[in-house]
Amino acid sequence: MNAESLGSMNAAQSLASGLMERGLGGIVFSPGSRNAPLIQAFASAGLPGGVALDERSAAHHALGMALALRRPVAVCCTSGTAALNHGPALAEADRSGLPLISLTADRPEGAHSEWQSQTLRQDGLHALHTRAHFTWKPESEEEAVRQLDGMAEALQCGPIHVNCPFDDPLYGAGTEAHTEVQPIPEGVPFSLSKPIDLSARETRISAFQSRLKQAVNGGERILLLGGTQPLNLAMDALASWSTHALLVGDPTSGMKLGDVPVITACDRWWQAWQATGKAWKEVEPDLIVSFGAPLISRKLRASLADGSPEHWHLDQGGLAPRAFGTPSRNVPCAVDEGVALGAKALKSGESALLPSFLSEWRKAWWDHENALRTGHFTALSAAGWSDLKAHACLHDALPSDTVLHLGNSTPVRYAALFPPLYDCTPWSNRGAAGIDGCTSTAVGAAMAGQRVTLITGELGFLYDANAFHLQPLPADLRIAVIHNGGGGIFRWLDGPERTGLGPSHFEWQHDTELRPLCDLHGLIHERVEDEDSLKSALMDWWSPAEAPKVLEIVTPSEESATAYFRYMEAVRG
Ligand SMILES: Cc1ncc(C[n+]2csc(CCOP(=O)(O)OP(=O)(O)O)c2C)c(N)n1
């Protein structure tokens, strides 16, 4: 068997059934001709998904679905530049370990050098941002199975790219798209651990556990540091960590504030510590265990790197980032598994009494944090109408059962200031931190059946407006757009203003109206411009609606930046 003799239709069919047997949870198509065999093969399977015009958005829709379903989800496009547009979502998935499958149709081998139209060199196109890539042109049944197993294995660590060269004929007769979604086939859930070399894995995990036990017994200062990752981490495991270690992480790390003692407002903590003039040495850890995407607070990360601490990183795919100046060691397991294994090791080493300098070390972090938490309410109530106030109102009103997505500019940073009332692990595309797919990712999670609320800035919203060129568009979606007239984040930085180009080239100030855009896509639009109208709009904002709702919250840009800086000062008391 080979793809040509088998025919494009059969090759696509065997890919579809092979991926479904291995746990494919959904698929998003973009229209095209070369991908006709894939469309026909997968559309008849009745998987959750949709058809999205823009491939960049489609790939983010699939990313959001993979996040919500905890399963691999595919995105399928035609040949040529379409294939390049899967890049941003693949880069995000690669950093955050999500099982996204890019299926790009291609012309037969050699078409590009023969100067045929709509071709580029597609094999390995996304090699730098995927865990593995494949050319789907199996020469035998055995090879097909081997490739499919390779795909399933790589998907446990992150995204893959499958390039599919298809020859004519591309169209069969009478494919019936299943509009009724079939139950997702049982397969490999993406967080399941099934590593390539079991013995090497066991050795590295037991080295990690021994090291933790030794650190506890030796009274070393251990920091568990969480970046963005998709899993809600188990409370009992985190509770064990909190007995022996300090927990610090982004609001999107899966360590939920309130359930365990964790510091999430990292920039607030760091800025206030700097203001005390105290030495960093007092709070420096000896050993960092990290997981997830890079920490949002660059300043805290840089200070942590100052002390060149020993560093271990939990990542199923073997990543060992040099995040704190020194080389790190990889612990090859999924984040939830690694946290649980670490907790077990810490518990087994707990016979030694906590040395007093260790208690003092943790107390230094927590005394500082507790003072800031006390100062929070006074500092917040002193603020006038601003981004800060708008975020506070939104976080107060969020229903506990909503799945929160956060734009990755200021919204994810503001979220760190408010103790969560919702049950989920909030999400933000912090892996590669592009603003180009935040809305599409939220839409993707809603496509998978979640009740999603997205809080975003208006530039991110405008940028990713193609998120709504999607059929069918899910209705259970609420989008709060903080419209501060530009990229508010650039007012938090020193540099842009000094250049004299701040408003024009960095913030990108504009007067774009959001209503016409919402009308274009059939979104229910409402606009508020002060605290009282925001509060009253939020009273029944989450009640069922026919279409997604967009709440445009207009805030003053200059006052918003001032309110943030005043808050950061006032919170110190
Ligand atoms: C694809 C991409 N382009 C540019 C940037 C740089 N960038 C980071 S934040 C930002 C502005 C975001 O503005 P907005 O969405 O209004 O949010 P705010 O800063 O007001 O919270 C830009 C352009 C990026 N991260 N990703």
Image: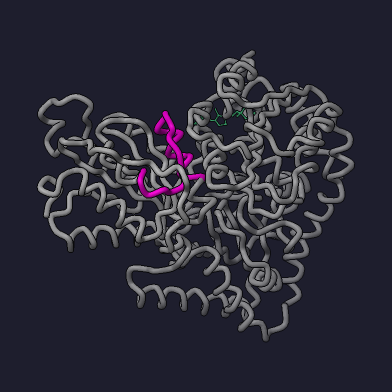
Q: Given the current orientation, which residue lies at the most extreme front position? A: 174
Q: Given the current orientation, which residue lies at the most extreme bottom position? A: 351
Residue 494 seen in render: no
Count of picture labels? 0
Is residue 70 placed above or below 517 in the rendered structure? Answer: below
Residue at 19% from the left image edge and 39% from the top image edge: 166
432 and 323: which one is in front? 432
> Seen in the image, is 92 located left or right of residue 256?
left
Residue 151 seen in render: yes
Give the image quadrant in which the ligand numbered 1 is located: top right
Magenta residues, start to end: 43-64
Say which quadrant the N terminus sits in: bottom left
437 and 228: which one is in front? 437
Residue 173, picture quadrant: top left
Say which quadrant the C terminus sits in: top right
Q: Given the current orientation, which residue lies at the most extreme top position? A: 511
Residue 105 at x, y percent in the picture: 26, 38
> Seen in the image, is 564 located left or right of residue 499?
right
Residue 358, picture quadrant: bottom right
Residue at 57% from the left image edge and 29% from the top image edge: 460
Is 222 within the magenta? no
Residue at 76% from the left image edge and 44% from the top image edge: 275
Residue 4, picture quadrant: top left
Residue 457 at x, y percent in the picture: 63, 30
Residue 483 at x, y percent in the picture: 68, 24
Residue 560 at x, y percent in the picture: 75, 27
Residue at 77% from the left image edge and 60% from the top image edge: 366
116 and 39: which one is in front? 39
